[in-house]
């Protein structure tokens, strides 16, 4: 069978996969108590916060809008770069006064920072009552119950290595568009990245569970799902299905209107997936986030990315053959240890050559446990800073030029909400945020909008009657 064919006798029906496990919840613990969660980081973290809120609501907590109203404050924080970790410490400091006023207030830290720092957090910040890791979210209601029962500090940041990833998506008000986790963890060990240490080994949810979730979200009014994983391309269901099989099944066997996915890894993005995307363009958006990280092959090797500059460019060329109107975005790191000026210029030229409509770029930040942190020749902060600005400047000009093509085009916009200025707001299949004059009755509908103002981040237009 060639790489881009789907196995027609997909073994999905031959293997029985156990139902998702529902967490046991003590429903008394939240009675009369308010919870506030402060979230930093990626979509995965945002999605984890939603799961935390859902679980805590099941335990009868009420969700409050301000930390001042809460009896339970959770900081769900990202540790991908150093800055957000500092933010956690300063945020905890800000809650000191609240704790003095209300000694019953409990403060917990979760997410990647909880996983990374564990007991160090409690040692450094005695105000913190509990810490939990990325694999312990479903245990949160019980953990919180323990914290309210005694003044002992609670730490639960162990990876459940053996437990299969059998959960159901929990989301309180999914709205029009929502996330569905398909994998967790990462086994790639890019030398700069802390994720394999904070989110553990990669695990995939069974395909049948994902389908079950999408169908039930559709019944709740969801029109668009974003399939989420650190590296969706290495998804592997217990029944042998890969990501392309999953995407095809979600497109063909559910009534979801639109499908997005993130994040892709260039080394694992295969032709079979391109084929499925092309075949199901009616549902699968023509937008791919494909982190390049660098445009120089030596740096890519040092980063352990598993592809060269040429291979990255070849893959993009192939993707564009399958999906000619493909829209791309990327992540870039500047100032990786040992990066010379010429090597940085290779990144600038790669970004130009591909023509990413959106670029997320970061200065390299040494992270604990990672290989690159102990590499020689770290680049000075001011050099990293200058390179980052140069890259943004160069990209900005191009992004404005690329956006011009939308001027006058009619795009299909899935309306998500009416914003504070009274404008209808939604996304086009190209993942562009679009604003136009429209009423609440349009929420959840996909409507044609003629663009009359186009910038890299925002498009404005008029509803085509
Ligand atoms: N320093 C800077 N950026 C990083 N990223 C991951 N680790 C680091 C680090 N140590 C960036 C990568 C990744 C994005 C989510 O964050 O570009 O794709
Ligand atoms: Fe980090 Fe690399 Fe895994 Fe992405 S693929 S989460 S950059 S280790």
Image (tube, rainbow, N blue to C red):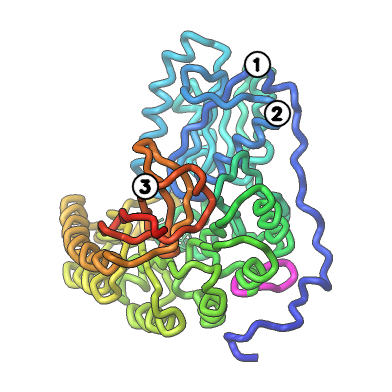
Q: What's the mark number on residue 437?
A: 3
Q: Which residue is drawn at 70% across and 57% down?
A: 215
Which quarter of the picture shows residue 235? Answer: bottom right
Q: Which residue ends up furthest to the bottom in the rendered image?
A: 1
Q: What element carries label 1?
A: loop
Which residue in the structure is indicated by mark 2? 59
Given residues 2 and 424, the one toward you in this image is 424
Q: In this view, does 328 lie to the left or right of 6?
A: left
Residue 162 visible: no
Which quarter of the picture shows residue 26? Answer: top right
Q: What's the mark number on residue 32?
A: 1
Quarter of the image that includes the N terminus: bottom right
Given residues 88 and 337, the one toward you in this image is 88
Q: What element carries label 3?
A: loop
Q: Using the numbered discs, state the Cα–Cα distance from disc 2 to disc 3 in whole angstroms.
A: 41 Å
Q: How crowded is mark 3: few (under 14 residues within 10 Å), some or many (20 or more)?
A: some
Asked if residue 150 lies in the magenta stretch, the reply is: no
Q: Earlier in the sequence, mark 2 or mark 1?
A: 1
* Residue stretch rendered in magenta on the structure: 237-244
Q: Main secondary structure of the magenta part?
A: loop
Percent of width and height locating residue 406: 30, 66
Mark 1 and mark 2 in contact (Cβ < 8 Å)?
Answer: no
Asked if residue 241 lies in the magenta stretch, the reply is: yes
Depicted 406 relative to depicted 95: above or below? below
Q: Earlier in the sequence, mark 2 or mark 3?
A: 2
Percent of width and height locating residue 68: 47, 17
Q: How crowded is mark 1: few (under 14 residues within 10 Å), some or many (20 or more)?
A: few
């Amino acid at each position: 069978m060639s790489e881009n064919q789907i196995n027609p006798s997909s073994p999905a029906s031959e293997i029985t996969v156990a139902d998702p496990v529902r967490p046991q919840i003590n429903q008394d613990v939240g009675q009369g108590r308010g919870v506030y969660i402060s979230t930093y980081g990626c979509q995965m973290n945002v999605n984890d916060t939603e799961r935390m809120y859902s679980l805590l609501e099941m335990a009868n907590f009420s969700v409050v809008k301000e930390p001042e109203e809460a009896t339970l404050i959770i900081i769900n924080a990202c540790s991908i770069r150093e800055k957000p970790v500092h933010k956690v410490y300063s945020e905890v400091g800000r809650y000191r006064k609240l704790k003095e006023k209300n000694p019953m207030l409990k403060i917990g830290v979760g997410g990647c920072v909880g996983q990374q720092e564990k007991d160090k957090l409690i040692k450094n910040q005695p105000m913190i009552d509990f810490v939990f890791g990325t694999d312990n979210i479903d245990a949160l209601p019980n953990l919180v119950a323990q914290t309210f029962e005694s003044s002992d500090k609670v730490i639960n940041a162990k990876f459940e290595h053996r437990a299969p990833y059998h959960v159901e998506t929990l989301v309180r008000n999914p709205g029009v568009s929502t996330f569905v986790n398909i994998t967790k963890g990462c086994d790639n060990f890019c030398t700069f990245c802390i994720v394999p240490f904070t989110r553990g080994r990669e695990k995939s949810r069974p395909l049948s569970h994902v389908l079950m979730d999408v169908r039930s979200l559709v019944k709740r009014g969801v029109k668009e799902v974003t399939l989420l994983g650190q590296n969706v391309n290495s998804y592997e269901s217990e029944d042998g299905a890969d990501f392309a099989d999953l995407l095809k099944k979600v497109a063909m066997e559910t009534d979801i209107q639109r499908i997005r996915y993130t994040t892709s890894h260039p080394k694992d993005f295969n032709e079979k997936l391109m084929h499925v995307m092309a075949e199901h363009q009616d549902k699968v958006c023509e937008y791919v986030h494909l982190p390049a990280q660098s445009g120089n092959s030596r740096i890519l090797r040092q980063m352990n990315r598993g592809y060269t500059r040429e291979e990255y460019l070849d893959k993009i060329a192939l993707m564009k053959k399958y999906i000619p109107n493909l829209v791309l975005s990327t992540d870039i790191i500047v100032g990786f240890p040992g990066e010379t000026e010429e090597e940085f210029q290779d990144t600038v030229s790669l970004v130009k050559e591909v023509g990413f409509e959106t670029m997320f770029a970061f200065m390299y930040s040494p992270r604990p446990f990672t290989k690159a942190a102990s590499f020689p020749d770290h680049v000075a902060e001011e050099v990293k800073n200058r390179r980052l600005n140069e890259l943004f400047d160069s990209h900005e000009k191009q992004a404005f030029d690329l956006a011009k093509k939308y001027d006058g085009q009619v795009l299909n916009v899935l309306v998500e909400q009416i914003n504070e200025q009274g404008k209808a707001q939604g996304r086009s299949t190209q993942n562009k945020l679009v604003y136009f004059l429209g009423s609440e009755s349009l929420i959840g509908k996909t409507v044609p909008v003629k663009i009359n103002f186009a910038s890299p981040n925002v498009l404005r237009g008029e509803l085509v009657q």
